Amino acid sequence: MTDAVLSVRDLVVEIPTRHAVLKPVDGVSFDIAPGEILGVVGESGAGKSMTGNAVIGLLDRPAHISGGEILLKGQRIDNLPYARMRKLRGAEIGMVFQDPLTSLNPLLTIGDQLSETMIEHLGISQAEARKRAIAALDEVGIPGAADRIDSYPHEFSGGMRQRVVIALALCAEPSLVIADEPTTALDVSVQAQIIALLRRLCRERDTSVMLITHDMGVIAETADRVAVVYAGRLAELGPVAEVLGRPRHPYTEGLMGSTPAASAGRARLHQIPGSMPRLGHLPAGCPFHPRCPKAQDDCRTDPAPTLAACNGRAACWHPVNSPESEAAE
Amino acid sequence: MSDASQGASRHTDASAEKPTPRSRFGRAWESDFAWKFRHSPVAIIASAVALLIVLAAIFAPLIAPVDPFDPGALNLMNGFTPPGTPNAFTGETFLLGTDDQGRDVFSTILYGLRISLFVGVSAVLFAMVLGVTLGLIAGYVGGWVDTIIMRIADIQLTFPSILVAMLIFGIAKGVTPVEYRDQMAIWVLILAIGLSDWVQFARVVRGATLVQAGREYVQAARLIGRKGPAIMLRHILPNVLSPVLVIATISLALAIIAEATLSFLGVGAPPTQPSLGTLIRIGQGFLFSGEWWILFFPALTLLALALSVNLLGDWLRDALNPRLK
Amino acid sequence: MTAIVTVKNLTRRFDVSKPWLNRVIERLPKRKLVAVSDVSFDIEEGTTYALVGESGSGKSTIGKMLVGLLDPSEGAVEIEGVNLDTETDRARIDKVRSDIQMIFQDPYASLNPRWKVRDIIAEPVAARGGKTQGLAERLLEQVGLSADDAGKFPHEFSGGQRQRICIARALASEPKFIVCDEPTSALDVSVQAQVLNLMSDLKDDYGLTYLFISHDLTVVSHMADTVGVLYLGRLVEEAAPGDLNARPAHPYTQMLLDAAPQLDGFGREVDPPKGEIPDPINPPPGCAYNPRCPFVVDRCREERPQLRPFGAGRVACHRAEEVVARMDKAS
């Protein structure tokens, strides 16, 4: 895909430590098309946030990109100097994090923060910026936007703050928004509001979204395509209804089975035994094999399967629900 | 849960363990703390200097050429001998020279160190026990108990600690009979410095206790029916000790300096039991008549001791701070 | 079946005033937050009762009052017929206390980092002077860990394993009733499934009674025999999970069910709920949900609805009949 807004190729992130070099992200590739919402789902420590941070150039030292490339609208951005990347972050890539307070400056009013971003990236006048800031707050559903524009972040509730963050992320009209667990800290009812808002605004502006979350339900309802991450690698990638509806990777199938559903009643939950291996202690072969019910000898000995080596959908030597596996039965 | 899945779960977790050396020493050597120490030249040098000084003080009677407090060993003719040169009358040579009484400066420093270190360590221990106890109680019990303890601490903080120490020293001197004054001086010094120093222990422990008391393992202990003292001692205390260790180290340097200051001002260790501060006081009288070594070497020793302990404390604070990892 | 836990008109107020001196200088009145307001329910022996609600619903406060970590401002908790606040017989109090245990939300904060796992698990028994020889090892194996783990420290375990250790500790004193305060909300889904299954198994093996506190309606539906829905400190609906999911009678329950993301809801367009949870210090008069409720009438703004029997469960809504009728018509 050459028209992709974001294109990540064989991304590797390394953290050198005393004992070993850890690879929290190891050979991840994906594209995000214009206006598309790509869900990135995985358990804690799977490397999903690290992937997002690599894209926006906000890796905490000593973590660094050690391989692969990241292209934004065909331009490489993984090797940009800090100042250029900073400029790009507001203008071309918007960010929404789990804790709204990390994206907001507690000492500035929200109006100042919005205006500042727009003046810097859009080159408009102070008065124009203020007018647009009010419009932006109005659009994200802040009641009485014109009155509240001079309020400070702490004067808003958690849900309202996250709305402000979304306004801030979108005000410079970026082509891509990275949303890292944007609703994890929020109540269910507020989560529904925020997700609906994010979806509506991005659809109206044709903005692409990389939505990072651990919540399969949020992904199912929001994303167009989904990437399932396990131990720093992509386990499965494809359209959301296919991946979650008919998962081919045993890990995805296990995740879906272990998520309780209101409709399923008291039936025993399917469980994936064990827990994700810690970085630096990955088993040989497929990283999932110690927990995999379908593991065979080649899973333990052959090199770890990659998407590219396995038909591009599921990184698994023995996928479930695939045309071949069903033909064999 | 089926047995097979449990087995698998155990298997993955076991394989995730890094190989650890068997021996206790091996594990300690491999710990993050030891690793940080091995990679910090400042910490290594500072602890080497501090260790050297402490050993010298402990083994002073074995190292010192003469016992400076044995009047029989003194020869007034040796007075004012410069370092490293033979005395004009007796021909004796002293490494760091002698003072006006003919006492060997090197030996007086070794013996003075013992007093300084003893007072410093005892005062810090006293301040620590007092401060940690009050801090734990204030943080765990809360309410008006907390208010009273911390307001007393606040009030005390508004006075410079050296002033508090002098006040306590003065009162103690007033109430002790004259014949016991010299014997009591050291203990009064410890009390004075300790009492002026407990506040920072109390403050830090109270803060850490508030954090720990809100954690769920403390609630679990309360639920079981554990009483306040048991929870404070067995659950909370072990978890607030690392900041205490840092403060204790830095306080030690400050206590040694405080002792030296008090002794320098003449309200500390008596001339019969001179500490480093007393030596400096004696030495400063001769500074302008050219006998610089009487002041210089005790002062240099005090500087080396205080600086190395302080650097060690700084390093400990960084090494034990999880946020700086 | 008999009720092992009876909660009657339970109310808890917290003083959230500024410090005394500030109040005097700034002439502020005392401020009270009503975290739990007039809540009554029973838990049958051997069942799981779930409390579900969003932040500020008072669900954790109720849990803490049940185990005795907080005292009620009004109302009473009776466990095995004993009111721990008014009972004077020490022996009976001790007996009941040893029958109650709790599992906490954060597996990283609920184990003392300086204690060995063996001592952590045995503490409930050791605190009463019981025999602890081999106890921790036996319990560790029961919760799916290895007896060798007893000599390790908590930091050597993952979140899920720590929660198993917490469960082992809760079982040590052989309790009858365990309060589980969001036991899996800090865990990943695959690990959550392991812990939920373990809890179900232990309940069957030991005949335990659970109070299961959660913000997640789907987890609650999976675990509970009876679900109580809390909103702003009030119990608004109580029903079996099947009935609750099929025919929610309170508009708030309906909203919660609608808002919860669904695993098969690909591209589902939800009409997001309106408004936010009001400030619990100044709750709206009448029904606390009235500012957000699509069924609101004048009566809802004036009169607080009482919890009343409705179908097989109970509901606190003046218009429950209309709510259910509208839903039946829609489907």
Image: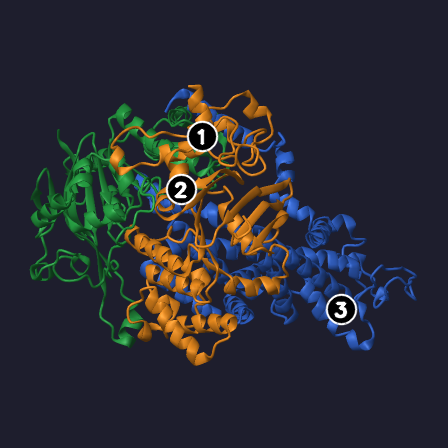
Locate residue A92, reporting x and y percent.
Answer: 51, 62
Determine which residue is flagged by label 1. A250
Earlier-in-chain disc, 2 versus 1: 2
Front disc: 2 or 1 = 2
Report in which chain the residue with disc 1 lies: A
User: Colour in which chain A is shown?
Assistant: orange
> Relative to C133, does residue B183 appear above or below in the rendering?
below
Locate residue C135, reporting x and y percent.
Answer: 39, 26
Residue C87, can we see it? no
Determine which residue is flagged by label 3. B295
User: Colour in which chain C is shown?
Assistant: green
Front disc: 3 or 1 = 1
Quadrant placement of the N terminus of chain B: top left
Q: In this rendering, do the residues under marks 3 and 2 share a single chain?
A: no
Disc 2 versus disc 1: distance between alpha carbons? 16 Å
Look at label 3 and name its amino acid.
Leu
Locate residue A11, reporting x and y percent.
Answer: 59, 46
Secondary structure of residue under mark 2: helix
Which residue is at a point 47% across and 67% down the rendered structure image?
Answer: A172
Report in which chain the residue with disc 2 lies: A
For this rendering, which residue is in front, C93 or C163? Answer: C163
Look at label 2 and name its amino acid.
Val
Report in which chain the residue with disc 3 lies: B
Locate residue C78, reporting x and y percent.
Answer: 16, 40
Q: In this rendering, do the residues under marks 2 and 1 share a single chain?
A: yes
How many C-alpha atoms fall within 10 Å of the one at disc 2: few (<14), some, or many (≥20)? many
Look at label 1 and name its amino acid.
Pro
As drawn, is C46 to the left or to the right of B117? left
Determine which residue is flagged by label 2. A240
